[in-house]
Amino acid sequence: MIIGQDLVSVIMPTFNAGRFLSASIESILAQTYSNLELIITDDGSTDLTTINTLKHYADKDQRVKVKFLGKNNGPGYARNEAIERAQGRYIAFCDSDDRWFPDKLEKQLALMLARDCALVCASYIICDDDDKETGINIAPPRISFRMLKRDNKIGCSTAIYDTQKLGQKYFMPDLRKRQDWGLFLTILKKCRMAYGIEYPLAYYRNRKKSVSSNKLSLVKYNIRVYEKVLGFSKPKAYLYFLFLFLPTYYLKVQKRNMDSKRYLESKNIP
């Protein structure tokens, strides 16, 4: 069953995405909910495979709308530029190396209608550069603002928000990393509750050289979210990070590891 007819704007930043890009774009264009536009902002790619792939899909499908930036500004900047151009009621996100299940949008829009909510996400399967499944991340069924303050529970490539219910578009904060967490915190300040689908609707590629792969480098950006987005003082931001974020993150990783072990065993993946 197709839910509604409102346009969905899918936001995709690209930067030297190479061999993963085509599969990501194809997974969006193949959605059972077809009333969508794919807004791509290329963040100064120098890789000809990326550039030529983007030009190919822009010529092939009128739903694909590409803009090339002259220099690299970071994924948050590229996403905001794409959000600015978006025409849809719903804003969804997909990174250029991730993929969606064909019914992702259909399932999530149905949940938004059933829950009368403005922000939803979903579980996702984790894979490596060779598409081998390595684990699973299961989204909580409910995500409150208080929960999200402790640690990000929302996978960016599974998130959708409703501009009509929120009354406006929401943009990423001016941060080089962790800007997606900052965005979801800002949205939950307004709507207070998000909902998650507990079965996977996307593939997240855990790349060795991705922006988020170096966890130690993310520490300062986690603290910056507390300062810039939530307005905490520096001492409060550090205390919150040490005594709330870190324990919550540790428990999340432990749960993800257990869930992943069960998932891989159920599929007989070594």
Image (tube, rainbow, N blue to C red):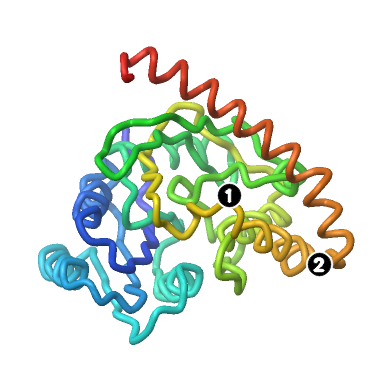
Where residue 254 sits, quadrant-wise, is: top right
Horizontal relation, residue 213 to residue 202: left or right: right
The image shows residue 51 at horizontal and vertical percentages of 19, 72
Q: Give the residue drawn at x 16%, y 67%.
A: 49
As rendered, which of 186 and 168 lies closer to the eye? 186
Horizontal relation, residue 125 to residue 252: left or right: left
How many numbered marks, from 0 up?
2
Q: Quick one: label 2 or label 1, which is nearer the N terminus? A: 1
Q: Give the residue drawn at x 36%, y 45%.
A: 205
User: At label 2, which amino acid type do we have?
Assistant: Gly
- The numbered dot on residue 118 is 1
User: At label 1, which amino acid type do we have?
Assistant: Ala
Query: Which of the two discs, 2 and 1, sits closer to the camera?
Result: 2
The image shows residue 170 at horizontal and vertical percentages of 58, 66
Where residue 228 sits, quadrant-wise, is: bottom right
Q: Residues within 10 Å of mark 2 (few under 14, many from 20)?
A: few
With respect to residue 45, does 110 lie above or below?
above
* Residue occupied by mark 2: 231
- The numbered dot on residue 194 is none
Pointer 2 with pointer 1, Cβ within 8 A: no
Where residue 255 sits, quadrant-wise, is: top right
**Image quarter in which the C terminus is found:** top left
As rendered, which of 136 and 132 lies closer to the eye? 132
Outermost residue on the bottom side: it is 70
Query: Marks 2 and 1, how far apart in space?
Result: 23 Å
Horizontal relation, residue 243 to residue 168: left or right: right
The image shows residue 152 at horizontal and vertical percentages of 63, 47
Q: Residues within 10 Å of mark 1 (few under 14, many from 20)?
A: many
The image shows residue 48 at horizontal and vertical percentages of 17, 73
Q: Give the residue drawn at x 73%, y 56%.
A: 189
